[in-house]
Image: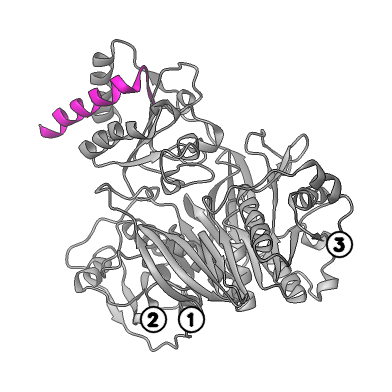
Amino acid sequence: MAGAFWCIVEDDREGNPKKVMAEVLGEASRLAAQMGAQAEAVWLTDKAAPEGIKLLGELGAKRIWLCEDPAFVPYRGEAWTAVVAELAGKESPQAILGPVTTRQRELMARLAARLGAGLAADSTALALEDGKLVATRPVYAGKLLSKVTWARVPWLATLRPNVFRPAEPQGGASAQVERPTVSIPSAMMKLVERKEEASTGLPELAEAEIVVSGGRGLKGPENFVILEDLAKVIGAAVGASRAAVDAGWRPHRFQIGQTGRTISPKLYMGFGISGAIQHLAGMRTSKVICAVNKDPEAPIFKIADYGIVGDLFEVAPLLATEFKKLLEK
Amino acid sequence: MKILVMVKQVPDTATQVKVASDSRAIDTTGITWIVSPYDEFALEEALRIKEKRGQGEVVAVSLGPDRVKETLRSCLAMGADRAIHLLDPAWETADTLMTARALAAVIKQETPALALFGRQAIDDDMGSVGAQVAELLGWPCASWIMEEAVDEAGKAVRVGRQVEGGLEVFDLPLPAVVSAQKGLNEPRYPTLKGIMGAKKKEVRDVKAADLGISPEPPALSVTKLEALPPRPPGRIIPGEPADAVKELVRSLREDAKAI
């Protein structure tokens, strides 16, 4: 439908939308309703699961543009961009939204270039003002907020995970499934192999609702096990500061901050992290911030909602015990 | 092999940034400028490719006002052979797309085998320009790369792209665009000899007309820039660790409803 708010589906590579899609669809539905339009999903995948299709409908997608082809896996910008651009050319959506993931960051940028449209990457708020979309984005290490608007449609934006209110699944709601014929250019880039990370059994950093993070105060790589034990109790992901990563204690993919991941969990707990500006850039939009540090002057206490001045080696195991008691109730 | 490295001048992370009186940009007085860190990874990688092959040319390219010359000099001091400065009042309102169009036009003129970018600039954190240049040129593109190896013939590059849950290794035919993620390498510091030598290297100014393009109005514009609203004051929980932890867990559950 012309004027629809499109949501590009990020899936788990097993045919099901990732949790973050509830947030993207929730926001798209809210905005679309204000314009008398509807939210629609665009899904490029090798194979969509029936439950995945059902879920998108329950989360508010009125229509799903489903393109199933082995050529869409793994993601290659050359193939994806052409297909989404072709669909957008035919259907004239008002907006194209997606979650911030490594591939959607690239896809949306390419799509913006192809369509000659603007892209607000890593937005933390969207609002309609006089019928025009305005996005809010943290900039300059999160020290400032930038409001941006588009010169023309479609409005392209990527949404920071865990910031937007997720749609509640509505049982019985379903989407009309369209399987459009699209031409898929053959990609010049060829996959050699995919190296899987050893699974930690803990949630992914970017999507986790609770993140436990460690810095220089941990004194060595062997001590991260203390945080992992705590994380297991509360279902948290484990992150690290730049100091801990640069010291070689944790792989770079766990780094939170300006030269690492930007996260926005419901609860962030920092242990032995001083709170340098470049770290705050990666976590200051967390809803509740909690810090444990020996140094009462550590800058992280300035933005923390709760703080304990103390020895993390003593506090973290006590926290694990207390949380366990609480959650067993 | 010719390699173009696109770099952006950004305020140092530790610099105080204030909003300018027009509420659309930052006040640039007193700011310390640096090369965006991810762009340094890109430049370092270009220098390593050249060194490994024993020949080639590394060209640093940047778009921005006069002060950007300083950034290009730093790139020359690190080892780039020459620099191109996209300098034109028409680019003052450049958004990512306008920047991408200008860079794509330079790349078309220079015809390098590889166009290297940082994954994102740390000022506006858009992270879009590299992928947009690839799209405009119709080149293959790999973003957020952690590993890179150009083949001996100089016809293809093998890259490891960071994705959620793993690393995807791809072969890309050249010419191609890649963007550097942290972890790709450890950038070198300029040597004194490098700094002295940089003064003699060429920095060429290029205007929009030289590229045969007339910049279009921006597709995305900043309507307002404002300071982050302060967080409500926090609470340091006093007492012995065991008591403090009990109180913290209670607060997180009952007051903050965070768990």
Q: Which residue is mark 1?
A: A187
Same subunit: marks 1 and 3: no
Given the image, on which type of amino acid does mark 2 rest?
Ala
Q: Using the rendered image of the protein, determine whether residue A3 is visible from the camera's viewpoint.
A: yes
Q: Name the chain letter of the residue that bears numbered label 1.
A: A
Residue shown at the point (67%, 56%) measured from the top left: B43
Left or right placement of residue A141 versus residue A7 in this view: right
Under circle 3, the secondary element is strand
- Residue located beneath label 3 in the image: B204
Magenta-span inclusion, residue B15: no
Mark 1 and mark 2: Cα distance apart in space: 8 Å
* Prevailing secondary structure of the magenta residues: helix
State the extent of the magenta-drawn residues as a range: A305-328
The residue sitting at 80% across, 41% down in the picture is B192
Kindly identify the amino acid type of the residue bearing the numbered disc 3. Arg
**How far apart are the two marked residues, 3 and 2, measured between alpha carbons?**
43 Å
Q: Quadrant of the C terminus of chain A?
A: top left
Circles 1 and 2: CB distance less than 8 Å?
A: yes
